[in-house]
Image (cartoon, rainbow, N blue to C red):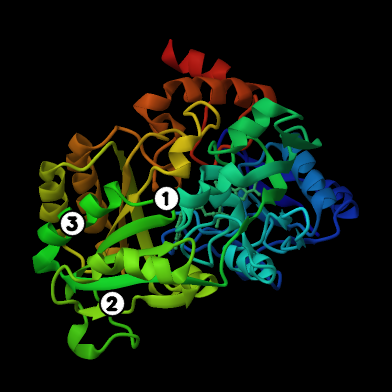
């Protein structure tokens, strides 16, 4: 391989000599990819079509030794470095123009121990991979709601799925994590080993190194359960949202409810006459006996004349992938979120007002009810802030043409700014298109301080900065002077 011209952390370009690339290759079992190599375009591809970036060099790792070699290369040459797990970062953090990409997508190994009820999961696995492996034993780790997202990024940022109120966030089920920190040292983090690092990895994102595998504690669920999926016309939004809120506030923790406001996508799954029709949809699962779940959730299916009602007995696997086709990769996306302490009638009105002011039928507004097991964990027990919030609202904008970027991004920002008045001032970092970890939340400022201390200890030079970035404490002090 020839020498490589690569962008560095300070923005300048650096020539890495062919002899240096050769020496890295000798220690590397996976593929080192340049723009003309077969496999380069697949390795650089990410979900959000806004980020069509071309790294100068991609290290497609097949094991922990490869990750060590890649991180040592980055520590020596200081390239602008991105890390890719499942590639579903909303903000496009897992790719980089002219820089160095550490691609983990081939590291998909999963080892389930049904006796101990644990799973060791490679950092390139998706939630679909993990759900299939664990459901073979009637077990699950709490993941997200789209099976194509990566276990890595979702868990490191927290992880809110359909079983969150029963079993907590994804990061709450972590037993330990294998990680290669900025100096290129592989270590295990858990409550016993490097506990500060383990704390930071539960909600603090990809700031502290490259995770090579996650060990999860598993829970019994499925294969069958009751799934709620009923849609009403948007004209009924105020009534439906109010009833959903009231129901959610007194629901048992087996129920985790979402409320989606959207317009029917123009896809075959829906009859043509419904295409683009705005709707409000109530969704969720009952994480216990399907019969009991059906009876409990029945009132939410009778709030008005539904557009459709697909509620009923389903499987955990089906509920985990029901939304996959509606958020395809390659489209252009911009998302922002808020946590909310509650939802009074004024908040309901605000949300309905913005639902009606959407300029793009592809803008999906998702409300998630929290509490239950999410709130059992003390605010400072993990880096994830906002444990006490009752709801999260996510404004998930998606469109096709670059010409529509400006209008859609401006609309999303205006909506998000106005909704601040009904929020805790904290955001969910995994749903945010463009803000750093300082936005973890007003209530989580102590967590932000501790994250900076941990960052200083494990990545003082901020090598891992393409993420919801936590500045090392020393840099943060300098920038506030
Ligand atoms: C369609 C879709 C649906 C979603 N649904 C949910 C949901 O239901 N619940 C929820 O909580 N979130 C959800 N999210 C948000 C999701 O949690 C984030 O987008 C998450 O970052 C995706 O993880 P990933 O591994 O696929 O992403 P990547 O793009 O690979 O990575 C995301 C971030 O994590 C870092 N990272 C990735 N792997 C590693 C690693 N091994 N070590 C260190 N850092 C790493 C990256 O550098 C980047 O900063 C959804 C996102 C999408 C696009």
| Residue at numbered disc 3 | 243
Q: Quadrant of the N terminus?
A: bottom right
Q: Tell me the residue that label 2 is attached to.
A: 265
Alpha carbon distance from label 1 to label 2: 31 Å
Residue 459 appears in the rendering: no
Horizontal side, residue 469 vs residue 138: left or right: left
Direction from residue 89 to residue 259 in the image, left or right:
left
How many residues crowd around disc 1 within 10 Å: few (fewer than 14), some, or many (20 or more)? many
Whole-angstrom CA distance, mark 3 to mark 2, is: 25 Å
Q: Considering only vertical position in the picture, is 459 above or below 481? A: below
Who's the residue at 44% across and 37% down the image? 375
Q: Nearer the viewer, mark 1 or mark 2?
A: 1
Q: Could you say where residue 472 lies in the image, as x and y percent from the top left?
A: 57, 23
Q: Nearer the viewer, residue 286 or 68?
A: 286
Counting residues from the N terminus, which is met first, the one under dot 3 or under dot 2? 3
Q: Image point 73% across, 41% down: which residue?
A: 179
């Amino acid at each position: 391989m020839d020498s490589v011209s690569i962008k560095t952390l300070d923005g300048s370009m650096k020539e890495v000599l062919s002899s240096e690339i050769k020496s890295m290759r000798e220690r590397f079992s996976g593929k080192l990819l340049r723009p003309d190599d077969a496999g380069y375009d697949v390795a650089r591809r990410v979900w959000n079509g806004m980020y069509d970036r071309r790294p100068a060099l991609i290290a497609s790792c097949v094991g922990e030794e490869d990750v060590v070699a890649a991180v040592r290369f980055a520590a020596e040459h200081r390239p602008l470095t991105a890390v890719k797990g499942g590639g579903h970062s909303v903000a496009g953090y897992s790719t980089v123009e002219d820089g160095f990409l550490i691609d983990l997508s081939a590291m998909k190994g999963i080892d389930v121990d049904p006796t101990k009820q644990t799973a060791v999961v490679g950092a390139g696995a998706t939630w679909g991979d993990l759900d299939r492996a664990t459901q073979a034993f009637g077990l699950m780790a709490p993941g997200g709601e789209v099976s194509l997202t990566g276990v890595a990024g979702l868990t490191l940022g927290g992880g809110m799925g359909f079983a969150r109120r029963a079993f907590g966030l994804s990061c709450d089920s972590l037993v330990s994590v294998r990680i290669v920190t900025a100096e290129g040292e592989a270590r295990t983090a858990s409550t016993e080993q490097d506990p500060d690092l383990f704390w930071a990895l539960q909600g603090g994102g990809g700031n502290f190194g490259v995770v090579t595998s996650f060990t999860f504690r598993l829970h019994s669920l499925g294969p069958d359960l009751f799934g709620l999926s009923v849609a009403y016309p948007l004209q009924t939004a105020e009534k439906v949202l109010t009833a959903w809120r009231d129901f959610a506030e007194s629901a048992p923790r087996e129920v985790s409810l979402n409320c989606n406001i959207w317009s029917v996508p123009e896809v075959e799954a829906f009859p043509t006459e419904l295409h683009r029709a705005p709707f409000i949809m109530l969704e969720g699962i009952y994480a216990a006996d399907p019969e009991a779940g059906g009876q409990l959730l029945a009132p939410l299916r009778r709030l008005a004349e539904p557009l459709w009602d697909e509620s009923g007995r389903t499987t955990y696997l089906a509920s985990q992938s029901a939304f996959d086709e509606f958020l395809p990769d390659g489209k252009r996306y911009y998302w922002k979120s808020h946590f909310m302490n509650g939802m009074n009638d004024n908040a309901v009105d605000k949300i309905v007002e913005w639902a009606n002011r959407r300029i793009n039928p592809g803008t999906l507004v998702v409300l998630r009810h929290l509490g239950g097991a999410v709130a059992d964990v003390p605010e400072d027990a993990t880096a994830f802030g906002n444990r006490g919030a009752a709801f999260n609202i996510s404004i998930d904008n998606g469109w096709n043409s670059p010409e529509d970027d400006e209008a859609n991004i401006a609309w999303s920002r205006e909506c998000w700014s106005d909704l601040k008045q009904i929020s805790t001032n904290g955001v969910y970092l995994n749903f945010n298109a463009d803000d750093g970890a300082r936005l973890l939340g007003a209530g989580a400022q102590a967590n932000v301080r501790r994250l900076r201390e941990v960052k200083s200890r494990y990545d003082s030079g901020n090598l891992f900065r393409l993420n919801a970035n936590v500045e090392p404490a020393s840099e943060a002090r300098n920038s506030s002077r």
